Image (tube, grey):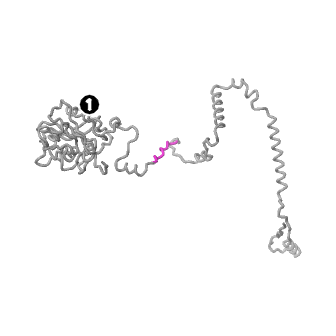
Amino acid sequence: MLVVVPVIAAALLPSSSVLSTSSARRSTAAARRWTVITANENPFGSFLDAAKAAAASASEAAKAAADSLAPIDDEYNSSPERQARLTEQQRIAEAKRAERQDLNAAAPAAARPKKNPLEKFVEAFTPIEVDRDGNPVPQAPPPVVDDRDAGEKLFGFFFGEQDQGVVSGIARTAGAPDTYPATKTEFADPVAADTAEMALLRPLLKNTNLEYLDLKCVYDAQRDGWTADAFHAGTNYMGPCLVICKTRGGAVCGGYAPKGYAGYGEYRGSIAAFLFTWPDGDTSSPPIKLQKNGGAGLATIDEPETGPRFGADGLVMMMNPGTERIVTSKLGPYYEVMPDGSRSVFSSKPSSDEMTELRVYSGCWPEGERIPFDGAIPFAIE
């Protein structure tokens, strides 16, 4: 196929007096010529053919030169004399290099880690912080990615974040304290700092949050006053606590409140709550321990205008004005009945007595450790 292409052989020239009339005519005629060019003709064909021929000749020459060289494993490079010349470190390095090469050759291509060809380039142009002497400043660790789901985040918001790893107090919490009914067959070991009364109560605290802690008296009615305000002033926000009272009839009794007090008018549930009593006051004999009945609900009632209350009627010290020392007990609905079937922790009277002493003991928590249940309980499923 032929293509007719007009070729402009002359450009427009500025008018000049030196140009003759005949020159102008020849220029105009040249501009009107047509040249016929074959469409498939390559003007560089001969140049490319010459380049290919030169490349082929160079390749043959290089191959011939390589064939004329001595093999790599010649006498100098592979002889025992060369091995003798190498130092011990060089022999070890060569052995390791050969081992790596064999492993790389044997490993499938898919198993080999892919290298980023731009990694070194990116590192070279990544700005780093240096000190006054030009030394790189250690970079902060990358932020921890929170991979918890929505439910775990919501639980942490209301109940606090879960402790990870070995934390303070792990020996005390290893047996999941205050999550099971109170034990009647195991007893806590004594603690060196216990007073006589603390040592009397210590065996009752097995598998509780107070088992290994030193105890302190946070409320004493004879010292602080027989009022509900004084009781809450000493016990609020102190975490789990143990209540003990002595009655005019001779009984020594009390109860363990796993979730303590805060004075917010809450009904605090816990399956680990329990009552204890020496009905006749003989503390040389083992105490009677009474577990929570009917599930965890209503283990203690935490109202700011009343004293300690275990269940609605298990062991109640209302501390109302005029009857501040009256304590009542009705077992069965919320706490176990006595081994003989009686429904009171007292011996002389069936349901009530007058207190002569009332004290509350709480734990001495390590510095920096969070006290459990030291405030309101916003949400709980009992």
- Residue 65 x/y as whole percent: 81, 38
Q: Residue lying farthest right?
A: 22
- Location of the N terminus (image quadrant): bottom right
* SS category of the residue bearing label 1: loop
Q: Residue furthest bottom?
A: 21
Q: Nearer the viewer, residue 9 or 183?
A: 183
Verify whether residue 142 appears in magenta: yes
Residue 360 as seen in the image, left or right of residue 140:
left
Q: Residue at x 27, y 33 (%)?
A: 185
Mark 1 neighbour class, 10 Å CA radius: few under 14, some 14 to 19, many 20 or more? some
Magenta stretch in the rendered image: 136-145
User: Can residue 18 be seen in the rendering of this structure?
Assistant: no
Q: Position of residue 131 (x, y in %)?
A: 50, 43
Along the viewing direction, whichever of 243 and 89 lies nearer the viewer:
243
Q: How many marks?
A: 1
Q: Is residue 331 visible?
A: yes
Q: Who's the residue at 29% across and 38% down the image? A: 208
| Residue type marked 1 | Pro
Along the horizontal axis of the image, is 325 left or right of 16? left
Q: Position of residue 313 (x, y in %)?
A: 19, 46
> To which quarter of the image does residue 109 belong?
top right
Residue marked by disc 1 = 190
